[in-house]
Image: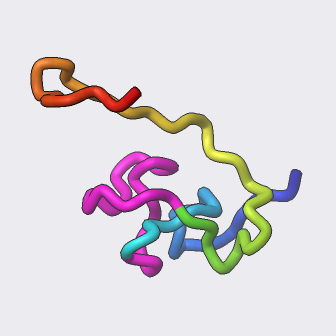
Amino acid sequence: MKSVSCPVCAWSGWVCEVHTDRPSEVATEGGCSCGGAAAPCKCNPDAVYDFAAVFAAVDPESVKDWVH
């Protein structure tokens, strides 16, 4: 796989879905912290560059109703 050479996405290939001028927090350490999902950067239009993992944390005590 070829490397990404784009400072907009902090060389990850992924930006914030809400703020496309910032790297995604999901894909890069220190990226946009607004909570938006990762979206492919202009340098990664076909989403061929994978990011390591996606993590979600849920505090069971804060959930009122579980969806089944």
38 relative to 56 in the view: left or right: right
Q: How many marks?
A: 0
Q: Quadrant of the rendered structure where residue 31 is?
A: bottom left
Q: In this view, does 58 lie above or below 21?
A: above
Q: Which of 5 and 68 is in front in this view?
A: 68
State the residue lying farthest toward the right.
Answer: 1
Instruction: Name the spot of residue 2 as percent of width and height, x first.
Output: 86, 57
Residue under the image location 57 percent in, 62 percent down? 14
State the residue lying farthest toward the front.
Answer: 68
Q: Which of 6 and 54 is in front in this view?
A: 54
Q: Quadrant of the rendered structure where residue 34 is?
A: bottom left
Instruction: Name the spot of residue 52 as percent of width and height, x first.
Output: 61, 37
Residue under the image location 72 percent in, 63 percent down? 4
Residue under the image location 54 percent in, 72 percent down? 7
54 relative to 29 in the view: left or right: right
Q: Which colour scheme is used?
A: rainbow
Q: Quadrant of the rendered structure where residue 57 is?
A: top left
Instruction: Quadrant for the C terminus, please.
Output: top left
Q: Is residue 44 above or below residue 3?
A: below
43 relative to 35 in the view: left or right: right
Q: Is residue 38 above or below residue 54?
A: below
Q: Point out the stretch of residues depicted in magenta.
A: 19-38
Instruction: Name the spot of residue 5 as percent of width and height, x first.
Output: 69, 69
Instruction: Name the spot of residue 64 as percent of width and height, x first.
Output: 13, 30
In the rendered structure, does residue 24 fall within the stretch colored magenta?
A: yes
In the rendered structure, does residue 29 fall within the stretch colored magenta?
A: yes
28 relative to 49 in the view: left or right: left
Q: Is residue 41 above or below residue 58?
A: below
Secondary structure that dominates the magenta span? loop
